[in-house]
Image (spheres, coloured by chain):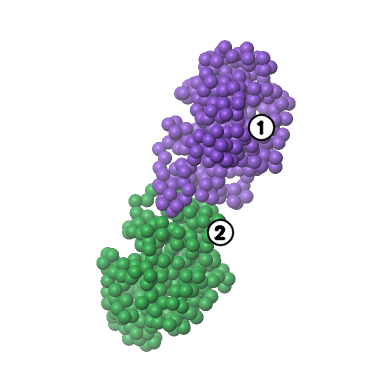
Chain colours: A green, B purple
Amino acid sequence: MKWLALAGGVGGAKLALGLSKTLPPSQLTIVVNTGDDEVFHGLHVSPDVDTVMYTLAGLSNPETGWGITGETFQALGRLKEYGADAWFNLGDKDLATHIRRTDLLRQGCSLSEVTQSLRSALGVEHPIVPMSDDPVRTMLSTDIGELAMQTWFVKHRCEPAVSEIRFAGAEHAQPAPEFERALSESDALVFCPSNPFVSVAPILAVPGVRDAIEGFNGLRLAVSPIVGGQAIKGPAAKMMGELGIESSCVGVAKQYQGLCDVFVLDDVDGDRAGDIEALGMRAAVTNTMMITDADKVRLAEYICELAA
Amino acid sequence: MKWLALAGGVGGAKLALGLSKTLPPSQLTIVVNTGDDEVFHGLHVSPDVDTVMYTLAGLSNPETGWGITGETFQALGRLKEYGADAWFNLGDKDLATHIRRTDLLRQGCSLSEVTQSLRSALGVEHPIVPMSDDPVRTMLSTDIGELAMQTWFVKHRCEPAVSEIRFAGAEHAQPAPEFERALSESDALVFCPSNPFVSVAPILAVPGVRDAIEGFNGLRLAVSPIVGGQAIKGPAAKMMGELGIESSCVGVAKQYQGLCDVFVLDDVDGDRAGDIEALGMRAAVTNTMMITDADKVRLAEYICELAA
């Protein structure tokens, strides 16, 4: 049975890790948001792709949620001395990823090809696929003006209130070839517990993707990133409040109406199962907290059993 | 009295340091060879410019002769894992220089402007000027084919025998604006003890430079990089043998005929003073060895006194 997982951010990477420990590489394709991609110091950075890649490679820093464990920051310190705008933390090992990616892109490789080369070199056997090889940029309208995702998220620490989100360039983008293949060939699809507005929505904004998921030939599941009204990590709950959307698993589920058959919510939200079912989805209630790797595998196994 | 120093490589950087401790920034312009420049991993590396810059900033590694003291190599290790061709040693701090340079060049700055920005940020007050803002690449014909300078020097450890040297792109290059200004405004000019064939010759290959030095309106001096028939550092002596040129201070002096008024040679070569004078230059004999910073200042002071 072939699975397609859609992911972005730390929550997505956690479930992707669980799935990768549950399913062989031939049965799992992980498609990742690239709306957060940004050029820093002339280098192409793909934050969500790297978070998934480093997580599956066992390199990710569990304390920060970004970057590589045991990282050093010699180059960044010097870049600051040189007057570079260095608010985005880039460690020395992490920089190698961006240098190599930028160099391969410059040589004519697609982002998909680059990602495959990088993850293979790190020993990751499961396919990690950027949602598109074309540039799509998540732009947030805020009370201090329009900001690119990382500028809002890192430089402004998610503080400016968000009123609107657009995905610049999406209209000209195509799904990555391996994403298109997985959409047509997979037997099950899971929306990982990622921010629906800035991690999953950019993926859905790529032309053809929403239609393909609406007509998907298999079971479609989603896992709520909101538990007890709060985001496990990140600004999803704050953002939902600002966008006038109920900050709850039900508010998330509404984003997936028509795209999802089974909605997985946490035990603490069990009383909302009826509201989920009223949206036309089956509600599946379990412990969705992923603290340890065992938690991640347990949730992945639970999801696989739902589709079995 | 305004000085123009022409430099390349470690010997050039040593005398440039001595001169910078002897002359104020308003009285010294250091023009550096860029024929060794190379793109590694998509990043523009200027080895000779950086050696001079790091030396004047007090950052250079005296043990290796290249790079920064106390350097780490986290990024390079990861680049190797990614399958990059990583024979050129690039430390993490050093990488920041190349990342910043490449980013500023991409933004439209000239190599001169970039160099000024970098050296100023490192606290270097003396002007360091690339010989040209245009690409000139030193190419060596060898017994294993034509090699770019760094490929021959670092990757092949100077082993392939050199039969011919050309400076690709030189015909389309212009001297950097500050180099042109210094050529017309300086009262004295010194060829630092750099390799005449791969450090100084590329500078002379930039159209207009040789003519300007032939007609230079002031004293022109050169310091021999060959002492007792050996290069203090680097492949100059080996290269001279392969090119059929006498590997001695006299062989060096012949390269500067018509371009130099006073040739400084080491005490150990004092018996060759007559041969130097026969070439139409005044021979100045002194201790040219630059081990300590005091040695570098002493030689710089000696040179300044020759012109006084």
Q: Residue at x 52, y 52 (%)?
A: A41
Q: Of the residues shown, which amino acid type is indicated by label 2? A: Gly
Q: The residue marked by circle 1 belongs to what chain?
A: B
Dot 1 corresponds to which residue?
B204
Which of the numbered marks, if any, corresponds to residue A108? 2
The answer to whether residue A113 is visible is yes
Q: Position of residue B236 (x, y in %)?
A: 55, 28
In 3D space, how far apart are the residues under numbered discs 1 and 2 (Cα atoms)? Answer: 37 Å
The answer to whether residue A147 is visible is no
**Is residue A39 placed above or below A78 in the rendered structure?**
below
Q: Residue at x 63, y 32 (%)?
A: B201
Q: Of the residues shown, which amino acid type is indicated by label 1? A: Leu
Q: Secondary structure at mark 1?
A: helix
Structural crowding at the residue carrying mark 1, measured as other residues with C-alpha within 10 Å and reported as few (<14), some (14–19) or many (≥20)? many
Q: Residue at x 29, y 78 (%)?
A: A305
Q: Position of residue B70 (x, y in %)?
A: 40, 38
Q: Which image quarter holds the N terminus of chain B?
A: top right
Q: Position of residue A118 (x, y in %)?
A: 44, 58
- In the shown orientation, is residue B214 left or right of residue A209? right
